[in-house]
Image (spheres, grey):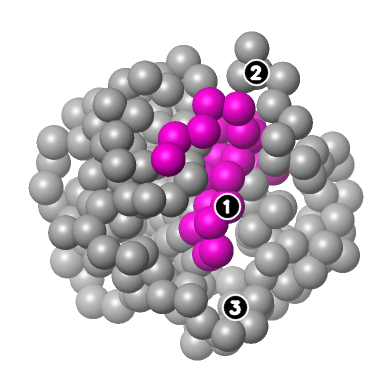
């Protein structure tokens, strides 16, 4: 595996191919890592299609208990404009699950945007798609994630990181700050501000303002 990561394409907005967003899910995922970003992305005026993708379609228990329902299996054909990889305690198990590692690596090559949250970067990093890029992860799991792939430029002090079309967010609620930053890149700052207002969410638009790094 490995390689340069997602191909850069001209322009900032979604391509309009109608493929929408594919979020990888697995047992033990962190609910807010997944549904916080999906809530905000789903408020975009172009109404992008949102898919939950797992090894097999069906319900998967989250780390908090309630299940997330996968509508797409890894083996199903097709790709997405946006790839989202959440984190959670389940990443400790899935880091050694080849099918769940291979899929985001392949998707990241074709996607226009790659977004990952919390310990989700550990899964994407193992594909080699983050090699040589700045990325961050959950503060409490930082050493564990960084040890999985030292070729990544892991940033301890960062609410989120961005390298071209690849974003990585620190723990849990940072994913919502990251998705707003990504929306600002995909569309513009006004679109991100509008989504934040609709969510009644105070967006920290400064990735370096990270009070939890202490």
Q: Is residue 160 magenta?
A: yes
Front residue of 125 and 75: 125
**Rendered position, 45 above or below 150:** below
**Rendered position, 177 above or below 146:** below
The residue segment tinted magenta is 153-177
Q: Which mark is residue 14?
A: 3
Q: Are marks 3 and 2 in contact (CB under 8 Å)?
A: no
| The C terminus: image quadrant | top right
Give residue 81's position: percent from left, percent from top: 47, 74
Instruction: Tell me if 193 is positioned left or right of 86 in this view.
Output: right
**SS category of the residue bearing label 3:** loop
Q: CA distance from mark 2 to mark 1?
A: 18 Å
Q: Are marks 1 and 3 in contact (CB under 8 Å)?
A: no
Among numbered discs 1 and 3, the one appearing first in the sequence: 3
Give residue 197's position: percent from left, percent from top: 88, 50
Among numbered discs 3 and 2, the one appearing first in the sequence: 3
Front residue of 135 and 82: 135
**SS category of the residue bearing label 2:** helix
Q: Is residue 149 magenta?
A: no
Among numbered discs 2 and 1, the one appearing first in the sequence: 1
Task: Kindly identify which residue carries mark 1.
Answer: 162
Give residue 118's position: percent from left, percent from top: 47, 33
Which residue corresponds to the image point at 13% horizontal and 41% vertical from the top-left? 97
Instruction: Tell me if 153 is positioned left or right of 55 in this view.
Output: right
Task: Kindly identify which residue carries mark 2.
Answer: 212
| Residue 63 visible (yes or no) | no
Mark 3 vs mark 2, foreground winner is 2
**SS category of the residue bearing label 1:** strand
Rendered image quadrant of residue 122: top left
Disc 2 crowd, CA 10 A, few/some/many (<14, 14-19, 20+): some
């Amino acid at each position: 595996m490995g390689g340069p990561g997602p191909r850069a394409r001209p322009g900032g907005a979604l391509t309009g191919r109608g493929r929408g967003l594919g979020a990888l899910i697995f047992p033990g995922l962190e609910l807010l890592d997944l549904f916080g970003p999906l809530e905000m992305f789903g408020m975009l005026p172009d109404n992008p299609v949102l898919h939950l993708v797992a090894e097999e379609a069906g319900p998967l228990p989250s780390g908090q208990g309630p299940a997330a329902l996968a509508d797409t299996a890894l083996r199903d054909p097709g790709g997405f404009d946006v790839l989202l990889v959440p984190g959670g305690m389940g990443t400790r198990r899935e880091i050694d699950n080849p099918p769940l590692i291979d899929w985001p690596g392949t998707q990241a090559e074709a996607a226009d945007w790659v977004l990952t949250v919390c310990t989700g970067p550990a899964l994407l990093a193992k594909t080699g798609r983050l090699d040589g890029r700045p990325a961050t992860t959950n503060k409490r799991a930082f050493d564990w994630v960084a040890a999985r792939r030292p070729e990544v430029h892991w940033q301890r002090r960062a609410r989120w990181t961005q390298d071209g079309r690849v974003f990585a967010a620190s723990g849990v609620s940072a994913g919502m700050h990251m998705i707003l930053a990504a929306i600002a890149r995909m569309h513009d700052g006004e679109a991100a501000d509008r989504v934040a207002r609709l969510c009644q969410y105070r967006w920290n638009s400064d990735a370096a303002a990270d009070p939890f790094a202490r």
